[in-house]
Image (spheres, coloured by chain):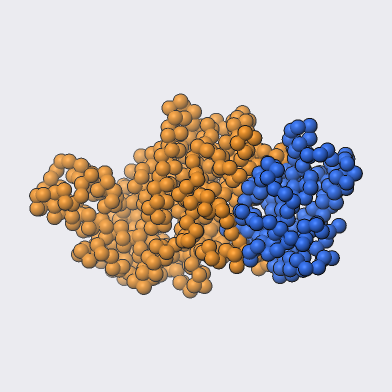
Amino acid sequence: MSAAGGSPGPLDGLTTWLTEHGAPVPPVPPELAPRLTQRNPATFATRDLGQSPYRLGWFQAEAEAGETGDYLLVGFAGHGLESKALHYYLVHGPLALFIQSLWDSASEPREALAARAAARFAAASRLLDAAERARREGRLGSGVRLVVVVSDFSGEHWKILGQEGGARYGPPGGMAAAEAWLQSL
Amino acid sequence: MRRVRRRIDRVERIPVAPAAAGAKRAHAKPAPHAAHASDSPGRAIAPGAPGAEKLLNLQRTVGNQAVQRLLATGSPAIQRLPTARQMISETGKEPKDFIIRGRKKSYQSLVDALETYKYYTLNAEIGTNAQEIDKQLQQMNGYLDQVFSSANAFLSSKKKGKVADFCRKIISHQAQERVMLMQIGMKFSRKPRTGKDFFASPKWYLEIPATFRNINTQQASVGLDTAQETGVGGTGAQKSVNEVKTGTPGGEYKGYFAKDMQLSEFGDNAIGVGGMMEEYGIDQADPRLAARSVAMSRLDALLGAGVIARTEFAVKNTEFGTVMETAKGQKMVDSVETMDMADPNLQRLMSRLQLIDAIAGQVDRHQGNYFVNKDNSGKVTGVTGIDLDMAYGTSGFDVNTPLRCDWYPGTSMLVDKDLAERILQVTEPDLRSIWEGLLSEAEIAAALQRWEALKAHLAGLKSKGKLLAPSEWNAQTAQKLDAEKRSYLAAAMRGKRGEDSRNPLPGG
């Protein structure tokens, strides 16, 4: 679903910009695509930023508190030798997905970093599809939110909020484990 | 960086004798010359090196004694010659406080001499060849002669009181200071810098001779990894950041060059940390990120913690920045799944990292920002923090409080004893001596406040006998750290379990 290459307008800008950086193109939900604009030289988003994407925790806390509507953000941010990343933040219905993929590194070649980001975007696309199917088929309770974090700075974890009134972590395995959980419902 | 750059520009134009205001008042007396000298059989310092014989003689006699004394007493931190600021602060005496003419004159002369010496050693870039270095050694020994003759002159007129005591303290530093200069000079004379492609820009005051560095290293617990070898950072041209080899003689090492970025360059380079700098009071108009990194490295060296990658100012292809030594091992985030969190060395060294970060106000110690090195049996031998520039802000950082949404976890009740003792013993002048010229006064003041707050916490633990010796870290302490949720180790343990490794949100 929702590959960037099939949509006109704003997605062309995102695709061109990422390609110029040697970066892969992530999935973009069609309903968010029209609102996607370049917010600064390093970021495309459907919202005002309020913070640098580098501060993943800030965006995560916002989503967990239910303080934001659906949005998409794609951007580079960071500093130093091993602290720059390509960010992909998507809040879309029951899914809040935060990918912070290392970009520029002394320890890994750029090609490896790009391949890792591409693999993550592919997994994100599958996860997005699974979440959308679960929502459409009524398998996710109302008010349930799945928060998935994949970061080269803080590791991987995912948790389910709002189910039976609480929050619980899912088993290790990142996006694949979260996708499997959605399919098991 | 504005202030630091100005100084560097000035020093580069005047490599041998910077025209300090104080220097105009100093009448340096050249040190005696010697026809030849060597630091080891068959290794010449420089043909006809002046001053070297005297210096070598010093090392053989009082110098070695000074070094031995330091080793014997277990000095907690490397100390250079006391500064005029330190003298006035400790004695409470300004020159104008003396009304007896002779005493006022000798005290003013001492203040001037100390200022001149500090200014020169802090600003003069170490020469690029043996001849330049010898000239600089002559100059500095002349300034030192002036310092000690002024101190003696004051003592001849007044033998009691705080200033007299301080004069004796200054005089007692004589041998050590001269030996330090000599060792620095020898190190750089053996293998002169090329000054062509890549070079660090070392200063006399900020260099720590190997012998004196070893004093601290000896105090550091066994297993600290201070070797200068290449770690996982490779040398392949396909890497987005290339490894470089420093031209620092005697201490040659591999590392990575980073340009000192201005905020205006962040967007164009697709980087930036946005509100993080604003929130923690890191000056956005003049971020001086290189200086912050060097200041962290020097704090680690001063305290002998051994958990921060060595970082020095450097110039590469006319661009100013830093070179950071390549860290060994793997990033925590890449090795967390197989990491033995009960490893005593891991716990102890991560405690050290947290203590250093507390003083520096380091706000970005994520798990890709430190490396863990292991030996062949899988035991942890080193922890090395990198990417040091998000530090030394002036707001938003309370030593005892976890940062919201970021990484610093507050103070733990489980702390490495060795480093805690050194943090309790180090003095404000020691800390100022490594930060002045790098940080603004407001940044230094904020760092000193953090240090005081940390000292209060550590003193409380010490009074209850709760500081942990190396043998006291074990599986139980790891469990306690995990339950406490106020340590880098606890964050890593959460990450290993597939939980959020960031600080828990309030109430979370």
At 88% from the left edge and 41% from the top edge, which residue is drawn? Answer: A138
Chain ID for orange: B
Taking the image as shown, residue B287 lies to the left or right of residue B448, namely right
- Name the image quarter holding residue B140: bottom left
Q: Is residue B148 above or below residue B135?
A: above
Taking the image as shown, residue B430 lies to the left or right of residue B349, namely left
- Quadrant that contains the N terminus of chain A: bottom right
Count all numbered tags in the image, as a single digit: 0
At 18% from the left edge and 44% from the top edge, which residue is drawn? Answer: B164
At 48% from the left edge and 67% from the top edge, which residue is drawn? Answer: B320
At 48% from the left edge and 51% from the top edge, which residue is drawn? Answer: B281
The image position of residue B436, as x and y in percent, is: 37, 54
Taking the image as shown, residue B6 lies to the left or right of residue A27, namely left
The image position of residue A21, as x and y in percent, is: 70, 67
Give the camera-side residue of B365 and A92: A92
- Name the image quarter holding residue B112: bottom left
The image position of residue B157, as x and y in percent, is: 11, 48
Please name the color used to draw chain A. blue
